[in-house]
Image: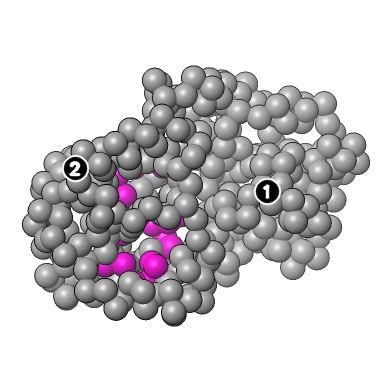
Amino acid sequence: MIYQVVPEFYRYDAISQHARHIHGMLKDAGLPARLCARRVVPRSLAGEVQDVREAFEAVRETDTILFHFSIYSPLIDALRELPGRKVMIYHNITPARFFEGISKKTARACEKGRRQLEEAAGLFHLALGVSRFNEAELKAAGYHATGVLPLVVETNVRDDRSFRSLYYLNERITLLHVGKWAPNKKIEDIVKVFYCYHKIHPASRLVLVGRNWEWENYTVAVLDLIQRLRLQEDIEIIQGLPAPNLAALYRAADIYLSMSEHEGFCAPLIEAMASGCPVMAFSAGAVPETVRNAGILWEEKAFLGIAEGIHFLLRQKNLQGILRDRGKARAADFSVGAVTGHFKALLPEILGEGRA
């Protein structure tokens, strides 16, 4: 049996969806597999995700555990007591410095997670990063058997055309960002860029999609900035969207903008490129690896200069076409079919010699 463990399983979470796709790959390969978690949101998904405590009681020496790691988890300690082969899929841990002065609890969890990553180097038989950036962190933490298993990103979601028309019928330029309001995402810098661009092109708006309730003081600070810059009427904040609506919004947006200062992969960049939305992003973490030559990256945060770059790109139809073509080609590298090829190649190593 192959037990795939996600500490917390969420319906629209990138890690959870990646785990779900791997589960499908295992089933397609004819291998017995179970998807497990400590917590499932919403509870209606509990039928397809087993309680990890029940799963751990059933693990045998001949079994394999695939553990998705992205922050401190007591499940790591539980793994030490279990038999079987253990494989980590590493999604990166945000450095604690981003949460200093914002959340002591989250900062501690990040610090503990980083320590746990190093301490667990001898526990796992194999550790796979979802990017080469993540694999480099694994090597630095003392892992010797490593590799890369790219993240699966849905690239063919059918969009809600009626929802898309709400944005197409409006003649304003739409800048888009998708992701939770976490300090490393630098939502405030996106707002500052938009402020500068809005001065250049007043017929514009910014749409921010993603939950913003996890770090209340950070959210309050960003909302206060929006108010002080008098952008309340020009920034639309959406807590979350069903996949067809989000796909429609990607396709309707003129620019996807990211100012994040730490990413282990950044799935929304691929989602945007798959939808034909040109990507402009700050070059940090795994972002250059994810985007490659399919978007425009900045090395410095010169807000006015970035705004002028947006204005320039939106007047260059040929350049937009080149970015769309490159973006769709890059997004294809993370389709289910493409990642399945990587997974099949890694499967003998995942299972161990003589176990495939």
Q: Is residue 170 visible?
A: yes
Which of the two discs, 1 and 2, sits closer to the camera? 2
> Which color scheme is applied?
one colour
Q: Is residue 346 magenta?
A: no
Residue 238 at x, y = what percent?
Answer: 43, 55
Q: Is residue 178 above or below residue 187?
A: below
Residue 279 at x, y = what percent?
Answer: 29, 60
Q: Is residue 41 above or below residue 98?
A: below
Residue that label 2 marks: 229
Q: Is residue 103 above or below residue 237?
A: above
Task: Between residue 24 and residue 73, name the one nearer to us.
Answer: 73
Q: Is residue 309 visible?
A: no
Amino acid at circle 2: Leu
> Residue at image x 33%, y 33%?
221
How crowded pointer 1 is (Cα within 10 Å; few <14, some 14-19, many 20+) is rated as few
Marks 1 and 2 sit apart, C-alpha to C-alpha, by 36 Å
Residue that label 1 marks: 41
Q: Left of 91 or right of it: where is 175? A: left
> Residue at image x 61%, y 28%?
72
Q: Left of 219 or right of it: where is 60? A: right
Task: Between residue 151 and residue 345, name the one nearer to us.
Answer: 151
Amino acid at circle 1: Val
Image quadrant assignment for residue 278: bottom left
| Of the image marks 1 and 2, the number of the one nearer the N terminus | 1
Q: Secondary structure at mark 2?
A: loop
**Which residue range is magenta in the image?**
249-271
